[in-house]
Image (cartoon, grey):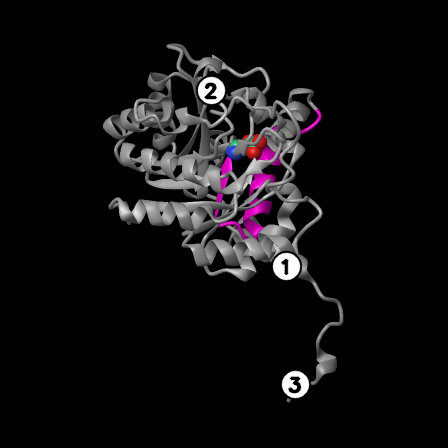
Amino acid sequence: MIDASDFPDLERPRRNRKSAVIRNLCRETDLSADRLIYPLFLHEDSQDEPLDSLPGQFRFCVKGLVSEIQKAKSEGIGAFVLFPKIPDEQKNSTGDEAFNPDGLIPRAIQAIKAEVPDAVVITDVALDPYSSDGHDGILSPDGRILNDETIDVLTQQALCQAEAGADIIAPSDMMDGRVGAIRSVLDANGFEEVSILSYTAKYASAYYGPFRGALDSQPRSGDKKTYQMDPANAREALREVDLDENEGADMLMVKPAGPYLDIIKRVREATTLPVAAYQVSGEYLMIKAASQSGWLDEKKVALESLVGIRRAGADMILTYYARDAARWLSEG
Ligand code: PBG
């Protein structure tokens, strides 16, 4: 007979930490390159241009983009999301360049598919890079973002991307009803196999600042608070989850990631769909700036930030650290 008094009363959780082998056996969360998605900026120029506002990142020309994807593929990154910087003269108030079949994004997709056919190409659906107003939707003269008019353009944008060969369409605009509308248009045109990764809970965040600098896509007036979510809200994210699921999204995203780990966890618990999280430009930049000043160990902090996002419940992470992380993880 075992007597409870035979057991020592001190709990010793440190036993499970006593060697690297045991720690590895007990580890609850894995981080690997195949969970990462690499966001890439591109432009019309013929040269790659380093981004001052996002050290370590570039605006690539189409040729440079393909070679960056080849390098990242060889390091274990399989999926890429593309963001175009559009010259001012191609922008207008309805963002028509977004569905130009000869535009930068369709040409880039075709170049990637020709050279690296198994790279998974994800495209952003929203008007901000193409809009002379710098908004994700169409701005009315009285300063409102017109939901249903915008959806007409977004569905054309999504179809144009699918026709060029995109594997996954990622609407980041936060208009109501866009996932269902895009799904219908894709299906009606024979693109049943093209997936939708919805920016389900996308917050009106100041952490997007460096990204908007990279694309010159700052709103020219007002802000994005009538379509992106209030950072104070969590229940509302679950409402967006229900809508996106019902409208046919294949994967759901939370954005930003680090300051919204509770949202990632709640979305994870509310859905059976895969959950993505976007470690956005400002999150990357904070780690970068602190480590360039010698204040933080970049490798350790970046990997810790990514494992934290995984632990909260993200299956996949969009991160500007994708290539570095793949390399660091392979170094052990
Ligand atoms: C545009 C879009 C934004 C980001 C991704 N898609 C910016 C915004 O909504 O203003 C931000 C990504 C980042 O900061 O890294 N719809």
Specify few, some or many for label 1: CA neighbours under 10 Å numbering under 14, 14-19, or 20 or more.
few
Residue occupying the far top of the picture: 46
Instruction: State the residue in front, 168 or 260.
Output: 168
Residue occupying the far bottom of the picture: 1
Whether 96 is among the magenta residues is: no
The residue shown at (68%, 44%) is: 231
Mark in the foreground, 2 or 3: 2
Magenta region, main secondary structure: helix
Whether 317 is among the magenta residues is: yes
The residue shown at (68%, 50%) is: 233
Instruction: State the residue in front, 245 or 78.
Output: 245
Q: Amino acid at mark 2?
A: Lys
In which quadrant of the rendered view does residue 114 lie?
Answer: top left
Residue 32, how many percent across, how many down?
Answer: 45, 43
Q: Quadrant of ligand 1?
A: top right
Residue 78 in sight from this viewpoint: no
CB at disc 3 and ligand 1 closer than 8 Å: no
Q: Which residue is mark 3?
A: 2
Specify few, some or many for label 3: CA neighbours under 10 Å numbering under 14, 14-19, or 20 or more.
few
The residue shown at (44%, 36%) is: 125
Q: Which residue is mark 1?
A: 15
